[in-house]
Amino acid sequence: MLLNQTDKIKLLNSLRNGVPTNSLLDYLITGRDGMIKETSKILDYTSRGVGTFKFITGEYGTGKTFLLQYMAKSAIEENFVVSKLTINKAFRLNKLDDLYYNIMHNLYISHDNSEKQTNFDDIFYKWIQQLKRTENAASIQSEINRVIENISKFNASFGRAFLAYIKASVACDTETKDAASSWLTGESNVPAHLKEKFHVIGKVDKLNMLDFLKAFINLVEFMGYKGLIVLIDEVDLLIDERSDIRLSGYINIKHLLDTLSGGEFGNTTFVFSASSVLFSNEEKGIHSYEALHQRMCNTISKESGNLEDYRNNLIELKNLNLIDYQILNNKIYKLFSSVYDIQMDITLESLRNWVFLLYKKENKNYKDITIRNFISRLIEILDIISQNPKKHIFNTNIEMQLNGSKLLFKSKTLQKAVND
């Protein structure tokens, strides 16, 4: 993806403030080769009808949201429909009908080689227009019957409503079309006299939600998409909810995990993301619901040798190692220098080392420095250098060595080592 100068400035501003961005995801992602490969496998399996469940965790600032954005971008480029959700006061995962509603109202697809937020009507627009242009009435009816027959297997009411939606769209009956679309996407306030037009009662609820979602996924595939990818961020916010709301959220996560693992959902992937506190807080976190805890938590310790396991339901992101931080450092510098005039008297390696030295002076252990911490401090240093070319403190090359769990620093003007 090529960015103009304005886009680059926007990207640097977002990185400066620690806000994830969709721009240059492929370029900036560093030290996540295993997760990149697993993302490719997940999309491949999903396109072949294998439902997948993943839960990504890690400390604040380790790049969980950034990784979800990368997964969304990859999925959209691979012709999936993507739904991107974030836990908040309005959406707390405690009701399955709310989950369905939010999925259906946060859809994204590929459009002109970029990401586009879409809706139920947009997804079927081209197909409906094609039906309108078809002169053979028998051919139109045969096509409609085939679609309705397939989705009615999942839920008869969904099939009736979608049939009414098609007919109203072709007949330019906007009122009925909009009512059917609203009902199909989980709206609860569709007037009864309009629902009578397509012979349905009630609404999406916890009992029929999964059937509705299966029917929608079937339609998505019929439209030529490979499947549905649902990404849900900041699940750790459930910890702050009332105990009954929190438990309902955990129960629903378990239900989705079991449904996907049991093969009931094809061409569908759910990926959740939460900070480590969701797994370390025994009173309010995943530990508080044993049935989910048993399904989620790894039983074999992988601390020794920093072992990785991306096939497990739970994937834990670690902070980068020093080599990966150097690679990220170089990428950020290249981006920065393409936007701002900057003359450095130090090497790129020393630039990275200055970041760690400044955090050391704040009594912060290098192992606790997150990707977000590193990037924001690095850009702060680059800003100072570029705006103060003749007077700043970052004009000395610094050597850095790892001694056990400590970093040792020294410079040409300061021969005495500074211990972390």
Image: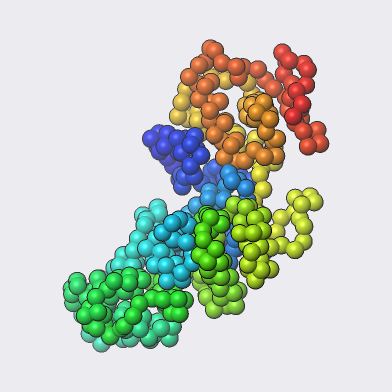
- Residue at screen point 44% across, 67% down: 99
Residue 254, how many percent across, how many down?
Answer: 58, 70
Nearer the observer, 42 or 235:
235
Residue 241, how many percent across, how many down?
Answer: 51, 58
Q: Which colour scheme is used?
A: rainbow
Residue 37, how many percent across, how many down?
Answer: 62, 57
On screen, residue 389 versus residue 280, left or right, reads left
Residue 23, how many percent across, how many down?
Answer: 46, 44
Q: Is residue 82 above or below residue 50?
A: above
**Quadrant where the image shows the N terminus:** top left
Nearer the observer, 282 or 322:
282
Q: Is residue 30 above or below residue 262?
A: above
Q: In this view, does 85 lie above or below 167?
A: above
**Quadrant where the image shows the C terminus:** top right
Residue 177, can we see it? yes
- Residue at screen point 57% across, 30% down: 378
Nearer the observer, 340 or 400:
400
On screen, residue 38 versus residue 305, left or right, reads left
On screen, residue 217 versus residue 409, left or right, reads left
Q: In this view, does 115 lie above or below 167?
A: above
- Residue at screen point 47% across, 22% down: 341
- Residue at screen point 55% across, 63% down: 243
Residue 372's image quarter? top right
On screen, residue 159 versus residue 61, left or right, reads left
Residue 314, can we see it? no
Residue 181's image quarter? bottom left
Residue 164's image quarter? bottom left
